[in-house]
Image (cartoon, grey):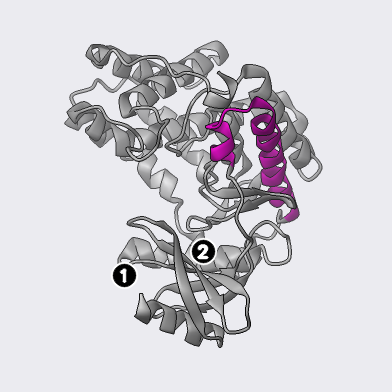
């Protein structure tokens, strides 16, 4: 830690002291430090792996890209050689996850709607600036990581002897096309899980830009439908609240993308995004779930199990696709997965504690 503080101090041009850990994982470590100017900053460091280097580059680019929008912290300094970022300290506040996992429905519902508006506002305010972001992160033009994950599915199924329905390749191609550059592309922090933000008096602030990039607005819209496509703290939202949150996000976007007001464009796009995220979850949860069940977060008081979450995702996607008559092979795959895992007997997913 001493070396890290020295590196961050040199990058910032101020002496840092009194480091206080805020978060730590295998992907990054976050500290709050006092400065010699009698203020505080947040220091984030990343491992020397390829993924750590990519996360550093994306976070630096993302923070620089949203500078002046108030969407998150300001980028103050960085050291590329040591993969260290110094950003402004936006204080302490609960996250959306804290409120959803709490005991009070009204603040949780209000925070969800504010979060949906913040997601939409950031997307709308940065629309059309793909070139600006690419200048900050030259690798932004590479194939989207989600596309790579989608094409892992056939091999994954063969490893677990799960039948691949006829036509699956064509359906996967339709879903993968969603992450190709399109007319509805927006900037996103990337991982907008409900614990990657602070619900402050000045609005919702995003605090994780490790996967920042340009992608389809539908991928963020699906977060409100599933809900929360890649997060550990997934429970059900009340139906009307979920619809309202998606309407808030969509309403902001239609000011920039008028065509998204059409259900014939919006609904199929969201369903494809739900399919993309559900397939993605297979690539990192199926092997562990087949081996044994377990909590999505062993340190949390409330968290679904892996099998519980997968069953919910499979049922939800199959229902959506069947009702719309879309992506029949992927819908059939969801049925095959449910049939192959009948022995799991996973319980249904309950409402978030704030609404139960």
* Pointer 1 local density, CA inside 10 Å: few below 14, some 14–19, many at least 20: some
| The N terminus: image quadrant | bottom left
* Label 2 sits on residue: 59
Task: Return the x and y of residue 77 as percentages of the image width and height.
Answer: 55, 78
Q: Residue at x 47, y 74 (%)?
A: 18
Left or right side of 177 for 249: right
Q: Residue at x 53, y 17 (%)?
A: 320
Tell which circle, 2 or 1, labels the residue nearer the N-terminal end. 1
Q: From which residue to which does the magenta span run? A: 96-125
Q: Residue at x 79, y 38 (%)?
A: 258
Is residue 105 highlighted in magenta?
Answer: yes
**Camera sees residue 222:** no
Q: Secondary structure at mark 1?
A: loop
Q: Residue at x 57, y 53 (%)?
A: 189
* Label 1 sits on residue: 48
Is residue 272 highlighted in magenta?
Answer: no
Kindly indicate the quadrant of the structure image that contains residue 241: top right
Task: Return the x and y of residue 297 as percentages of the image width and height.
Answer: 36, 38
Q: Secondary structure at mark 2?
A: helix
Kindly indicate the quadrant of the structure image that contains residue 74: bottom right
Left or right side of 216 for 304: left
Left or right side of 302 for 155: left
* Pointer 2 local density, CA inside 10 Å: few below 14, some 14–19, many at least 20: many
| The C terminus: image quadrant | top right
* Closer-to-camera residue (207/133): 207
Q: Main secondary structure of the magenta part?
A: helix
């Amino acid at each position: 830690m001493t070396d890290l503080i020295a590196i961050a101090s040199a990058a910032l041009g101020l002496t840092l002291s009194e480091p206080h850990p805020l978060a730590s994982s295998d992907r990054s470590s976050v500290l709050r430090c006092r400065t010699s100017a009698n203020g505080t900053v947040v220091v984030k460091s990343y491992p020397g792996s390829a993924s750590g280097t990519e996360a550093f580059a994306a976070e630096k680019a993302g923070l620089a890209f949203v500078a002046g929008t108030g969407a998150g912290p300001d980028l103050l300094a960085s050291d590329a050689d040591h993969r260290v970022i110094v950003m402004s300290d936006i204080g302490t506040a609960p996250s959306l996850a804290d409120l959803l996992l709490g005991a009070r429905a009204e603040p949780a519902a209000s925070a969800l709607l504010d979060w949906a508006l913040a997601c939409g506002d950031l997307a709308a305010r940065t629309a059309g600036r793909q070139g600006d972001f690419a200048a900050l992160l030259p690798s932004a033009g590479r194939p989207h990581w989600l596309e790579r994950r989608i094409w892992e599915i056939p091999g994954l199924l063969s490893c677990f002897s799960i039948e691949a329905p006829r036509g699956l390749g064509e359906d996967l191609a339709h879903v993968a096309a969603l992450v190709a550059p399109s007319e509805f592309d927006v900037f996103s922090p990337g991982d907008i899980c409900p614990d990657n933000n602070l619900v402050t008096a000045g609005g919702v602030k995003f605090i994780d830009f490790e996967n920042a990039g340009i992608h389809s607005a539908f991928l963020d819209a699906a977060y409100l439908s599933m809900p929360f496509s890649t997060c550990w703290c997934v429970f059900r939202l009340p139906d009307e609240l979920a619809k309202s949150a998606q309407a808030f996000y969509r309403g902001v976007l239609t000011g920039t993308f008028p065509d998204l007001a059409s259900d014939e464009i919006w609904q199929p796009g969201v369903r494809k995004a739900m399919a993309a995220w559900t397939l993605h979850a297979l690539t990192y949860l199926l092997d562990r779930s087949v081996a044994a069940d377990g909590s999505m977060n062993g340190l949390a008081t409330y968290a679904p199990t892996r099998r519980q979450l997968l069953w919910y995702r499979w049922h939800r996607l199959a229902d959506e696709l069947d009702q719309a008559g879309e992506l029949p092979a992927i819908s059939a795959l969801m049925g095959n997965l449910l049939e192959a895992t009948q022995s799991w007997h996973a319980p249904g997913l309950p409402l978030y504690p704030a609404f139960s």
